[in-house]
Image: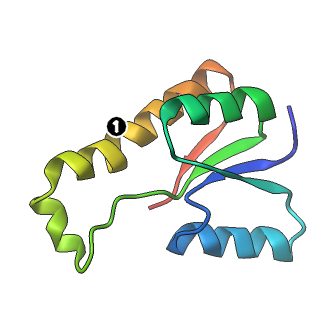
Amino acid sequence: MSEKLLILGASGYLGSALVDECQKRDVPWVRGFRDSLTVIESSISELQPALVVNCAAYIPTPSVDLCKERKRETMNSNVLFPSAVANLCHQRNIPFMQLS
């Protein structure tokens, strides 16, 4: 297992703040891409990170209030996707953290 963090959503609001803190503290990290669960699974298997942190979320613009109208996208991105990633991590004994 590597000592790196795998950060999903590293370019978003929370993810970029986490990346900044990792850089300040010399914590090694790598950006994970949320293209598909298959890509995430490959990244987890290949990297064997010390921790997977999901900071990715579906936040419609101009307002988060639109989540009520876009229930499918909200549920897929903010509930089902993190659950699937957590399950992948659990199967590999890799800790998973959700930040939202």
Asked whether 78 or 97 is in front, the reply is 78
Residue located 85% across and 61% down the image: 27
Q: Percent position (x, y) of residue 97?
A: 57, 48
Q: Residue furthest left?
A: 69
What amino acid is at disc 1? Answer: Leu
List the residue tagged with mark 1. Answer: 80
> How many C-alpha atoms fall within 10 Å of the one at disc 1: few (<14), some, or many (≥20)?
few
| Above-or-below relation of 58 to 26 | above
Residue located 59% across and 66% down the image: 15
The secondary structure type at the circle numbered 1 is: helix
Q: Percent position (x, y) of residue 51?
A: 71, 43
| Above-or-below relation of 81 to 84 | below
Left or right side of 98 for 61: left
Report which quarter residue 29 is drawn in.
bottom right
Q: Quadrant of the N terminus?
A: top right
| Above-or-below relation of 81 to 98 | above
Q: Residue furthest top?
A: 91
Left or right side of 5 for 68: left
